[in-house]
Amino acid sequence: MILLTAAIACFALCGVIAAFLQWASMRGQLRQMQNQTELNRQEAVALQQAVVRIQGPDFVLESPMSKPALVIGLRNEGIAVATKVGFQGALTWKDEPRHVSVGQPTPINIEVPAMPQGDKGARGYTLTIPELTLDELKMIRRSTKNRTIELRGVLTYVNGFDQLFPEEICKIYFAPALGDPAYAGWVDCEQYPAKVKWWDNYEREQQKAQRPN
């Protein structure tokens, strides 16, 4: 009788152990499935999410008699539709070479409820800048040695998968006194000091070369 009881108890214990091992195995498989599902979702987001870029601003004349203006472009380079697209920032005059702000900034507030993919999502926004006359525009296009313009702000959008993306934008207009538009344009703010230093070194070398021996 004792042996029978012990056998029954042993059999029950083995059943409990087998059930526990089965449960642990199922739990491990479930965790692997969850990890794989999350990985698949991350891959889908990476491949299909909306990616909004701010395109290089450019100065334009809306008509021969109008004031110069600045066109800022936004474009969705991803696949999903971007929503709640916005750019909040300002355009600021900078006196050079001190690089200090002068005058009142021109505020920028762009809001787009939805932006589809590619060319269908491309948007251009024209901003008139106070104090930017045609003469001023010609001056900074020739050289930004005395004055330039800084564009600074934050671009935000929802990428189509309920994820909000903020991106800080900072660009400065740079034009060395070469009279060649190929060297003029907007550069990232962190690159601007290197551009100015490059131009200063270039001018010094030119002055040395022109000195009589």
Image (tube, rainbow, N blue to C red):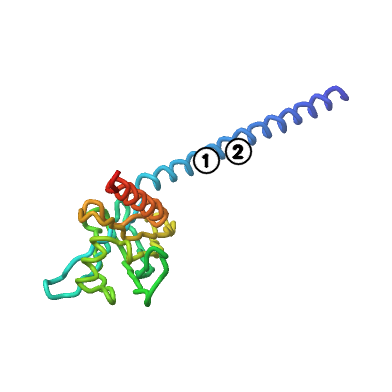
Q: State the separation of the CA atoms marked 2 and 1.
A: 12 Å
Position above or below: 34 against 163: above
The N terminus: image quadrant: top right
Residue under circle 2?
A: 27
Q: Quadrant of residue 102?
A: bottom left
The amino acid type, in three-letter code, at marker 2 is Arg
Considering the numbered disc 1 on the image, is that residue within a helix, a strand or a loop?
Answer: helix
Q: Residues within 10 Å of mark 1 (few under 14, many from 20)?
A: few
From the viewer's perspective, tell me whether residue 140 is left or right of residue 194. Answer: left
Horizontal and vertical percent for residue 90?
Answer: 37, 70
| Residue in the image at 20% along x and 53% along y | 180
Whether residue 55 is visible here, answered yes or no, is: no
Whether residue 66 is visible here, answered yes or no, is: yes
Q: Residues within 10 Å of mark 2 (few under 14, many from 20)?
A: few
- All told, the count of numbered labels is 2
* Furthest residue in direction front, as rendered: 213
| Residue in the image at 25% along x and 58% along y | 121
* Furthest residue in direction right, as rendered: 2
Position above or below: 103 against 192: below
Earlier residue among tags 2 and 1: 2
Horizontal and vertical percent for residue 171?
Answer: 36, 59
From the viewer's perspective, tell me whether residue 119 is left or right of residue 44. Answer: left
The C terminus: image quadrant: top left
Horizontal and vertical percent for residue 138?
Answer: 21, 66
The amino acid type, in three-letter code, at marker 1 is Asn
Q: Quadrant of residue 164?
A: bottom left
Considering the numbered disc 2 on the image, is that residue within a helix, a strand or a loop?
Answer: helix
Give yes or no for contact between labels 2 and 1 (Cβ–Cβ under 8 Å). Answer: no
| Residue in the image at 32% along x and 51% along y | 203
Residue under circle 1?
A: 35
| Residue in the image at 40% along x and 48% along y | 45
Horizontal and vertical percent for residue 160?
Answer: 37, 56
